[in-house]
Amino acid sequence: MNEQIKLQILEKIEAYQTIVVSRHIRPDGDAVGSTKGFTQLLRDTYPDKQIYLVDDDFSEYLSFCGGEDSAPEEIYENALLIVIDTGTRKRISNKNYDRAKEIIKIDHHIEADPYGDLNWVEDFRSSACEMIADFCVTFQNRLKISPTAATFIYMGMVTDSGRFRFEGVTGETMRLAGAMLDFGVDYETLFANLYTEDVKRLRLKSYVYDHLGITEHGVAYIYMDKAVQAQFGLSLEEASDVVSDLSKIKGSLIWVAFIDNPDGSIRVRLRSRFLGINDLAIKYHGGGHNMAAGATVYSVEEMWACIRDADVLLGEYKSTHEGWL
Ligand code: AMP
């Protein structure tokens, strides 16, 4: 069935002269990689079309990928908008998205809002970039796939899968990643950009390990309040990144970072292995994936309630399962 949707997407692309590509707010490696890669693919294949990549948001750590375009408002009425890696319309990082003539949604989140005129959603994929890689391979005889496009697509596959480690990585993921390598990925520059850390970040890591909490059943958590953000001179994004520092603690199958937002709410970043935390995220006004989800709490009391719920969830899991670590 999805073979049919992919073909319909290609036909729509070929029918439109003006195409806008967009992604989700607070873009991550997959959002940037999929949209940059797809935009590059379209520009290389259809040099006579007008292709814009519009993103009203920005990610400091991905600034090495370069900035985005702005598209004049008047182009939207005849434009095809392709939104990638964005589950719900409220997360689309393009204030003009609903002016487009037609919308195509390409996404790997659990379907909650089929906002596209065409929706290609495969929630079993480890990244949206994996879907873009699949699109490239499916239509490789009709598309021009440059090393630049392949490198962006590979970037999203690497980052969203935790370097091919998370749930959702399959043989197909690796075959598609291999196909991207064959198109000419510059992985040395890519990995240096993605994974070298400056001393400030390492000192922050040291703070996180000194100050994290661990509940009775092993939930690891850290609260990055405004004072800590100021102490280390952190952007919101830098403060939010610390969730990854909690991922390697033995027995802590759930880990959570709480980050003070400027508006007084607290961003919650939930991660897990072996068991799912999406229902917990939904309870706290969020959602996402089975083992990586986001939520928001509105007070320190609610933050503690979320930690207690996570602890109960993990306690139940540990008492009924074996083999976790
Ligand atoms: P984050 O911790 O913000 O990186 O989110 C983890 C995953 O959950 C990402 O794939 C997000 O797209 C998704 N997510 C985050 N916040 C929400 C939300 N409020 N509603 C639905 N999905 C979310």
Image: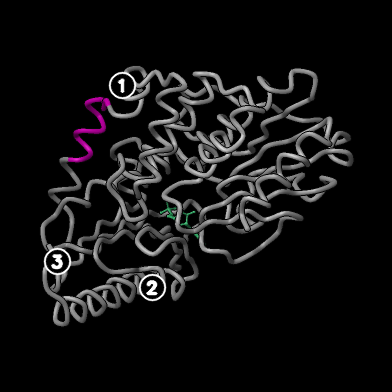
Toward which corner of the image does residue 36 lie, by quadrant? top right
Q: On residue 177, which mark appears?
A: none
Q: Earlier in the sequence, mark 2 or mark 3?
A: 2
Label 2 with label 3: CB-CB less than 8 Å:
no
Question: What amino acid type should be assigned to the residue bearing mark 1?
Answer: Ala
Mark 2 CB within 8 Å of ligand 1: no
Quadrant location of the N terminus in the rendered image:
bottom right
Q: Secondary structure at mark 3?
A: loop
3 in the magenta segment: no
Q: Secondary structure at mark 2?
A: helix
Q: Residues within 10 Å of mark 3 (few under 14, many from 20)?
A: few
- Which residue is depicted at the point 77% across and 30% down? 71
Q: In x, y percent, where is residue 82?
A: 69, 43
Mark 2–mark 3 distance (CA, rounded to whole Å): 20 Å
Question: What amino acid type should be assigned to the residue bearing mark 3?
Answer: Trp
87 displayed left or right of 115:
left
- Which residue is depicted at the point 88% across and 39% down? 78
For the magenta stretch, what is the residue range? Answer: 196-205
Q: Nearer the viewer, residue 115 or 16?
A: 16
Quadrant location of the C terminus in the rendered image:
bottom left
Q: Nearer the viewer, residue 297 or 289?
A: 289
Q: Which residue position holds label 2?
A: 280
Which label sits in the foreground, 1 or 2? 1
Q: Which residue position holds label 1?
A: 192
113 displayed left or right of 176:
right
Q: On residue 324, which mark appears?
A: 3
Question: What amino acid type should be assigned to the residue bearing mark 2?
Answer: Leu
Q: Magenta span: helix, strand or loop, mainly? A: helix
Work out whether residue 266 can be spotted. Answer: no
Q: Residues within 10 Å of mark 1 (few under 14, many from 20)?
A: few
Q: Secondary structure at mark 1?
A: helix
